[in-house]
Image (cartoon, rainbow, N blue to C red):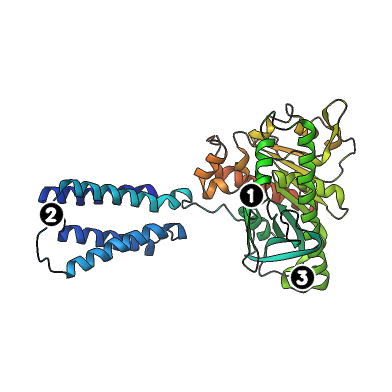
Amino acid sequence: MQILILVVTLVFELAIAVHSIATKQSRSKIKSWTRIAMFIGFVMLILGKVVVWEYTWGLFAGLLFILAFKEIVALQRKQTHTARYKVFSAIWKFLLVALTVFVTLVPVFLFPQYRQPQVTGPYAVATATYSYMDKNRIEEFTDQGDNRFVNVEFWYPEQADGTYPLLVFSHGAFGIKSSNTSTFIELASHGYVVVSIDHPYHSFYTVSEDGKVVTINPEYMQEVNRANKEGVYSLGEFYELTQKWMKLRTDDMDFVVDTILEQAEQKKDSIYERIDIQKIGVFGHSMGGAASVALSRERDDIDAIVNIDAPFFSELMYDKVTNELTAKSEPYTLPLLNVYSDDVWIQLDSSSSYIANKISNKNFKDAYNVHFKGAKHLSLTDLPLFSPILANLLQEGRKADIDKYYVIETQNELILRFFDYALKNQGQFAPKATY
């Protein structure tokens, strides 16, 4: 739709320019009524819900309004004299308007209209956001001596009785807490309380309840980017970085879980009253998936884990003598579902950072492993849905060779079935190896 609107708008503006050149008039009623009609037509598209109004249309709508208003004023004026006509001026004005139209439509191209993934549960889903202050930790990314805060968002059954399992989500390296919103909604619609964490300075941006905005830390971003390039860090340095990242992530998750359990016991809020504190699952994408596996080793109240496209950083050991990464030998006994894209699947037997993830690792012999063939790393988030261009750019121009709706909806179904099986003892879970 956005492409059609761009083309139609440019065609009308070109027609205005051609008419102006042909008649040698810079002002005409045809030009005025054309631009007024363009604005009215766009409003009609919105009212008819052909165009779904989003904030991304704001700049374009504002431009059409300004052009239309200018022409309304021009129609009210009496032309007292005829200015000398210049062909170059008409061409220049057309190019300027065309460029402005394109610029105002950039947000629409970056975040186009898209279909929401299917929601299959019987419950309507509500949301709520909170900011938790950890009085036991000082923020390490600032020198202000302030306590670390963590922003969270809940998705939960709005009109439902009883209590429901708690699922805690951690986003990827540069992600945000809403990165897998479609998954959260699907789970909540089936009777789960899902809480997603923004890890301050690890998330692209986060906003607290009082309006404080915190963006990603440049040094952390540089660390992650360099760690993904060979030869920048030694193996020992890489190992130390991963353990540092895991500690911050698991500390955040540990704090959030403890806070929620405390609130649930005191029943201070209707959201917390819905939580079954005896059934807890954790899941995450990329670095958040690695942190989920790590947290499950630290707490004895976690019952099920979903790792989405992440290495088991917490399962690695570094041998300084041999300069090698090895996998720990402790068996992993909790229910675990690993979901992999092509980007990670091809590294399971070739990258030392994924040595613990190997399918042949006997310590994880009971884990479920699922591979989405043709999927890229970000295919396992909602980003390709609401911004295909950004997803491709972040994946260095590599487009996934699989339908984006098939991936996210199938993944949502798998995660739901897994948690139903592991936390609610409902049905069986026997996923295919490849989708």
Sequence-wise first label, 2 or 3: 2
Name which residue lies at 76% across and 68% down. Answer: 272
Q: Which residue is mark 2?
A: 25
Occupied quadrant, residue 69: bottom left
Which mark, by number, is residue 221? Answer: none
Q: Give the distance between the C-alpha atoms of the residues marked 1 and 3, in whole angstroms.
A: 29 Å
Q: Name the mark on residue 273.
A: 3
Q: Which residue is mark 1?
A: 175
Q: Secondary structure at mark 3?
A: helix
Amino acid type, residue under disc 3 in the picture? Glu
Describe residue 75's horizontal placement relative to residue 40 as left or right: left
Q: Secondary structure at mark 2?
A: loop
Q: Which residue occupies 30% across, 49% down? A: 98
Tell which tag, 1 or 3, sits nearer the viewer.
1
* Residue lying farthest to the right in this orientation: 330
Q: Gap in Å between the C-alphas at discs 2 and 1?
A: 53 Å
